[in-house]
Image: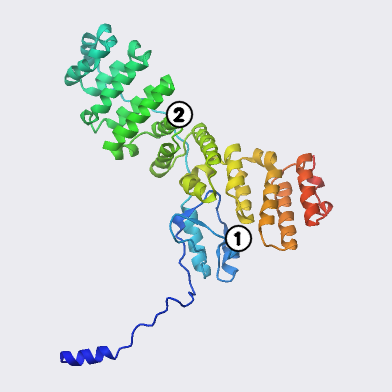
Amino acid sequence: MAPHETEILDSKVPDMPDVSKGPRLYTDMIRPDDVCDLVLRPNFNDIIITALADGAPFTGDPKYKLTSKSTVSGSKFLFANITARWIDDFNELLPNLQPIPEQKMLASFMTETKRLVLDKKFTPEVISSSGDLQIFIEAVKLDVGLESTVEYLLSQPLVISNISKYALIMDYLTHNVGSLSRQNLPDFVDYLIRDAESCATSEKASIIDLFVTDSVLTLFPDVIKELSPSAVNSLAGFALHDHNTEAAKLFFKSLIDTHKMAPLKETFKHFISIYSSIARQKEKNKERILKDLTCLKPIMFHYGLDANSFELLLSRVIDNSYDLAQFVRLALLSPELLGDYAEHILLRLHHIHKQSGQSQIAKAVETTQFVRLLLHDYGVKLDSRLRSVLQMICDEQKISIDDMKLTKAST
């Protein structure tokens, strides 16, 4: 075909119609791994409710919104098979974690021959001399190795009792990280962490945290995957000495991703305590809190909630009745909290109802369902505080408290 004939044919092809201003029948669907969340664990009932609703919006409510890491937040799944697959994929992102095992014996870089050499080189006078100490380390490390030299020095009483000596040795290490054996580095860092823990001073914690985070992991970022789980937990604890929740969060995430383990309960409680205080001071909202903490969701489901996480989530994150039901289910892992905070749960439901456009009948039904869930299914006792709150809500919603048949759950 001649070129001019091709041009004639091309000119007769109509332009693509502009549909940009037309209504969209489908919206982009959020990826399961883009969801920011701390309480959701949908089950078979959620699949059925979602799949049977028109357009299959998550939870069956088209107004329900998921918080997303990306710009896509739509959760209208359209079909039952997509709903089931999405929820399965979402739940697979929540691994079951294991506890950190007992610490193993630390590797030692010392031999008797090396110790004899070091005993001769490092007299008490040399160790007590701040000006000469780093010079001697430089000279001695060629004979016995830097790791052995540091291990020897950190075991000396003059160093153990003097934080400035410790800081001097760590400062030398900071400037000579490249001289450390890459093969021995994970064991050596484990040793340094265990040594710092043995004294448990905030000064040592800050020094070792700075050394590992700013020196070792900057030069050898993969070392974090080779450290023992207990060492990673300790690093999180050191970071929290300085209220560095971001660094602690990275160490927690490493425990989850690399080892499928949870940090020690005390370490995580310390983190939540600090983070909760910061969140209140900075008035962080639901979206910010979920984006900050979503990577730690497996730990939440491993340990359950404590008083700080319970109050933080209930007051700043839970803003709809579906999430409240999921929150209560998570709180079952810490059953004593349900008894202590049952009236707060009902007050939160009451607040949610005031913000919603639900009918009075729908609100009354939900209130009754939550009361029976707490008192009959979960065994919460109806004390005077809970009865007072419940009476107030029932009066407002024109529900008869006697119709709830609460006598079996009363104290």
Above or below for 366 versus 99: below
Residue under the point 27% across and 25% down: 173
Q: Nearer the viewer, residue 363 or 287?
A: 287
Residue for badge 1: 45
Question: Residue 291, image x and y in percent?
Answer: 47, 49
Q: Position of 33 compared to 281: left or right? A: left
Real-space Cα distance between discs 1 and 2? 44 Å
Number of dots carrying numbers: 2
**Residue 306 visible from this viewpoint:** no
Residue under the point 74% across and 61% down: 360
Q: Nearer the viewer, residue 213 or 101?
A: 213
Question: Residue 196, image x and y in percent?
Answer: 38, 23
Residue under the point 47% across and 42% down: 97
Type of the residue with mark 2: His
Q: Position of 159 compared to 331: left or right? A: left
**Residue 344 visible from this viewpoint:** yes
Q: In what element is the residue under mark 2?
A: helix
Q: Nearer the viewer, mark 1 or mark 2?
A: 2
Above or below for 194 versus 268: above
Earlier sequence position, callout 1 versus callout 2: 1
Type of the residue with mark 1: Asn
Assign the N terminus to one quadrant of the image. Answer: bottom left
Q: Is the residue marked by circle 2 packed among few (<14), some (14-19), or many (20+) residues within 10 Å?
A: some
Q: Position of 1 compared to 222: left or right? A: left
Residue for badge 2: 241
Question: Residue 4, image x and y in percent?
Answer: 17, 91
